[in-house]
Amino acid sequence: MITEKLQLYNTLSRKKEIFEPINSPLVGLYVCGPTVYSDVHLGNSRTFISFDMVYRYLKHIGFKVRYVRNITDAGHLEGDRDEGDDKFAKKAKLEQLEPMEIVQKYTLGFHDVMSIFNTLPPSIEPTATGHITEQIEMIKKIIENGFAYEANGTIYFDVEKYSKTNNYGELTNRKLEELLEGTRVLDGQDDKKGRLDFALWISAKPETLMKWPSPWGWGFPGWHIECSAMSTKYLGDTFDIHGGGMDLQATHHTNEIAQSQACSHVAPVKYWMHTNMLTVNGVRMSKSAGNGFLPHELFTGDHPLLEKGYSPMTVRFFMAQAHYRSTLDFSNEALQAAEKGLKRLFAAYSLLGKLTVSETSDSPVAQIRKSCYDAMNDDFNSPIVIANLFELVRIINSVNDGKEKISSSDLDLMKDTMKVFIFDILGFKEESESSDNGVVDGLMQLVLQWRQQVREAKDYAASDKIRNELAKINIVVKDGKDGSRWEKS
RNA sequence: GGUCUCUUGGCCGAGUGGCUAGGCACCGGUCUGCAAAACCGACCACUCCGGUUCGAAUCCGGAAGAGACCUCCA
């Protein structure tokens, strides 16, 4: 049963719409995955983390979601010109590997990063190379329907012809004339007829490494057709949600719509969702600009712009504090704020089991819970959810201090609300410091017990010496009411 | 050049007409041998200039600044 009424922003209509799946409670969700010719950077990760939250929430409120996220492992050219090799082949030459070794290497790396960020795996993760047949079939159909043509073994999509019966620029709200104005004039090196035409199939040169036979000779697929073929294969000619980064909207997604429409005469997607970019000093993080952070650089702090390392959940929390459609600016200060905030959230969560209940309750737990759902239902407004969770944090701490009361039923509701939103929906998890089977932890307990003894004997010179020596090896001791704790600085 | 978007307190970031999120920092307090931590409290901002309105961060017009797309990128 669907328990909530969800609104989401549809790029196609440029407004929020009530989400009504085509075959409720089934939901088809497709997200453009990475092109695995290099490491995913943090900006890439943001999109997948955002859609992980979407996927989690849709499931939470009762939908049965088929989440398809592809791996682009062939055919992604540097430009639209026929240079013979795609990104994989180029990288393969650079790293002296087989193209498929490149694909394997970076696919594994991508999966690692996704797992570190605690994202759920998609239901299906199809690869472009595994769906060459489907792509060829789709291209054949587009040619049959008269919207594509062949030139020297390469197949181009005829945008101007398509535009006569369809609105090519609908996703970005642009007219064909405007698009034509912004495009360079053909310089005679291309075989294509129209300036906006794009390749569906690219003819292989003798030196091309990754190529497949087709009715038009040996070649490889264009980037856009891959997503169209894979999404329709697993989700149908028309499916519910298609997501991706905003940078894909103007070209990739616009062409996906055109291809599907030209193939099956129906709009492929009911709701288009686009996530915004991660920026560094206000400028978009991207591979080409060279301002991308790799996840492991962030975790270790091994980067000139980073003052220290940040844990994966700190980063995920940092991202969840901004709305997915807003740009998010990356800075040390913001990351440190996120780190402390998340720590406070978890600290309050762990207090939940220790609270004393009262007969009455002066905490509006039910309203806060509703506010959390309202926020998610309003186009996945995670920042508002977090603001509400911190309202619960305040209450938890006040009850713990004996300043507020909570009833047993409100406490249960609070526990469930915290659990559902922190873990199930926002996808955070608790991170433990120790990875050495507790050896360090055991040693530290000994040291702290010893220090406690000298403190009780009021030998503060000795206890301070222990604390100072530990500080030298980056261990901070914190004395609380119920004993001392330690952590790495 | 064309199209579009954005401009919120020290920092990050919600918020589409009145009730002025949240986190972090700063400040005050509690606790503590001290320090740190933790907790509580306080802190009321919306680029500028006009307009609409009883009332605008929020709507309209203009200016300035920044960014995105148009060309590979989540």
Image (spheres, grey):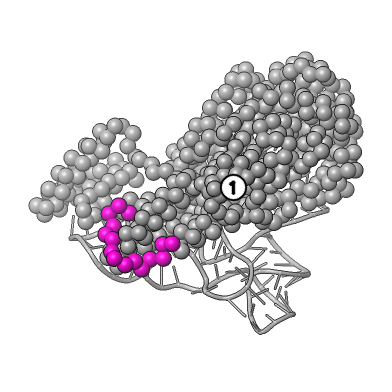
Where does residue A391 sit, x and y in percent of width and height?
42, 62
Foreground of the two, A373 or A350: A373
Q: Is B10 above or below relative to A61?
A: below
Residue bearing mark 1: A278
On whether residue A442 falls in the magenta region, the answer is: no
Q: Residue at x 83, y 46 (%)?
A: A167
Q: Secondary structure at mark 1?
A: strand
Residue sitting at x 88%, y 25%: A151
Q: Position of residue A190 (x, y in %)?
A: 86, 30
- Which residue is rendered at x = 22% and y = 49% of the image? A484
- The magenta segment is A352-366
Q: Nearer the viewer, residue A365 or A430?
A: A365
Which quadrant of the view contains residue A37?
Answer: top right
Task: Specify whether A387 is left or right of A38.
Answer: left
Farthest residue toward the top? A206
In this orientation, which residue lies closer to the viewer: A79 or A228? A228
From the top left corner, tell me how far across and down residue A361 is, in percent: 34, 66
Up-down: is B57 above or below A45? below
- Please, which chain is the residue tagged with disc 1 on? A
Report if residue A446 is visible in the image.
yes
Q: Label 1 sits on what residue type?
A: Leu
Q: Quadrant of the C terminus of chain A?
A: top left
Is A147 positioned to the left or the right of A379 in the image? right
